[in-house]
Amino acid sequence: MLCLTLTGSTLEENRLQIERNRPWISLAELRLDYLTEAERHIAASFPDMVDLPLILTHRRTSDGGACADAEKVRLQSLFDASRGAWTYVDIEGDVKKSDLKFKSPQGDGRIDLEADLKARGIKIIRSYHDFEGVPADIYARISRLASRGDIPKVAVTPQNLMDVISLLRIEAELATIEDKIIVGMGAWGVPTRILYRRTGSMLSYCSDGEAAPGQLTARVMSELYRADRLDEKTHIYAIIGNPVYHTASPKIHNPGFAAIRYNAVYVPFLVDQVRTFFKIAEMLQIRGFSVTVPHKRSVQPYLGRITREVKQIGSCNTVVRIKGMWKGINTDYYGFLAPIADRISDGTIKGALIVGAGGAARAVAWALHNHGVKITIVNRSIDAARVLAEQTMSSYDTLENAPLYSGTVDLVVQTTTVGMDSDKDPIPSFVFTGSEIAYELIYEPRETTFLRRAKEAGCATVDGSHMLMEQGKLQFEAFSGYHYPHWITVSI
């Protein structure tokens, strides 16, 4: 089940949120702490306004909520709202049983909220939140929360991949607790939200905004990742990096899997230690993964086989499982060449200027060198430029001297991250003559200052989305064994 956490301040706003997200969700959570005081007084009527099961909760600020009321006042509001036809009511695990007895609305005695909810067929969720980390005794905590016969919920904040492993082991460690809710919050927890069934969780939360750290939208969870339809037979693929959530690769692979009806999902993993990720890969039987910075070199000691391109470039961006071992591939090499291959083969491109000398530049330099293109590498660090130039039998120079090459090359390739988050240009003094092909490896933004200047000068241009798509298609083939479906349109 995908549960939409409602973030509106009125019942009507929340009803509209459900209406907008209805195709992708199975239930929703009403947060009393987000409502205005007037709306909280009529919250019991909300289940009659919508057509799906609902969770009711009233979250304290200490648990990531917005309620700063005294505890007695908060619980009274929860009791008053609980008079409605809810499916679940979420009560924090540290709330004492004695604090859940309230004066009857009719004034004829006191009502035990827990007993009353159960008598009305409303299930109780007992929750624990930790915004600092994953407690060492998390399995014991879940067991204690479940000991009353309630549904245990733990929302914790993994700080590294080892914490993620702790969450992924919950299903095996606590398989006897059938109904449970496991949430990994924050950046490290995103894979556990998508793969919530692998943690044994009965649901995963989503929201229009980010009601809790790391939440995705219902549409992304259901349409892009098919999180609510994954099962034990689903093949898992991944992309690893640090950072990683800027990547557009899931928008390539997941629609491709869906188009060929391949039961698979492609999930981003924030990775601090490659060694730890390989442990997760074994736990989840991951069949292949993409590799982005800074791990394109560090994965290589764990590979049983590598291709010629990986050996030559020293960079691996794709790993696949084959016959009991991992094989490393570099699809950046061929992905870069694809948009310009015809112009290399017909002699249009004879000389190239490469801006940068990092990992991306290495793939570009080797691809061009192996196809007979004369290369000059310009870089801020002359030493890095010299090393790459010597390996590829190329020329090199400082970045400041890039203008000296205006009018002397057929291709200018921008491989640095300059321009990704700003309007900066790595070679602002370089004068385009209009005859060059300007190739930008950045794909977000689609048009950088570098590309815009080239277009204004009349140059043909290639933006980074072309290389991303081409290398992604090659990865898809390595992962699935099928050609990428030509009939689908990918929006990057």
Image: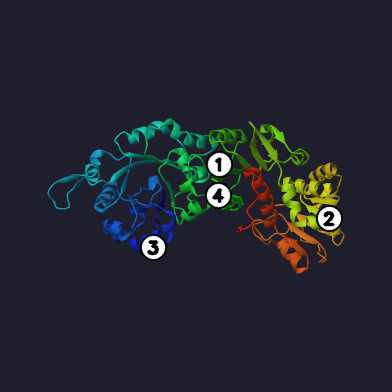
What is the CA distance from the residue labelled 2 to the residue labelled 4? 37 Å
Residue type indicated by callout 2: Ser
Q: Is residue 338 left or right of residue 104?
A: right
Residue bearing the label numbered 3: 16
Real-space CA distance between mark 3 and mark 2, rounded to the nearest whole angstrom = 57 Å
- Along the line of sight, the residue nearer the viewer: 235 or 18: 235
Disc 1 + disc 4, Cβ < 8 Å: no
Give residue 125's mark.
Answer: none
Can you tell which quarter of the image residue 24 is in? Answer: bottom left
Residue 490 image offset from top left, x and y in percent: 61, 57
> Upstream in the sequence, badge 1 or badge 2?
1
Question: Compared to 111, does 442 lie above or below?
Answer: below
* Residue of label 4: 261
Q: Is residue 263 above or below residue 346?
A: above
Q: Are marks 3 and 4 in contact (CB under 8 Å)?
A: no
Q: Secondary structure at mark 2?
A: helix
Image quarter (top left, top right, bottom left or bottom right) of the C terminus: bottom right
Give the residue pinned by disc 2: 345
Tell me, yes or no, whether the two marked residues, 2 and 4, touch with CB atoms within 8 Å: no
Q: Is residue 396 visible?
A: yes
What whole-number distance in Å separates the C-alpha atoms at marks 3 and 1? Answer: 34 Å
Q: Could you tell which of marks 3 and 2 lies nearer the N-terminus?
A: 3
Looking at the picture, how far across and down is residue 357, in whole percent?
A: 77, 47
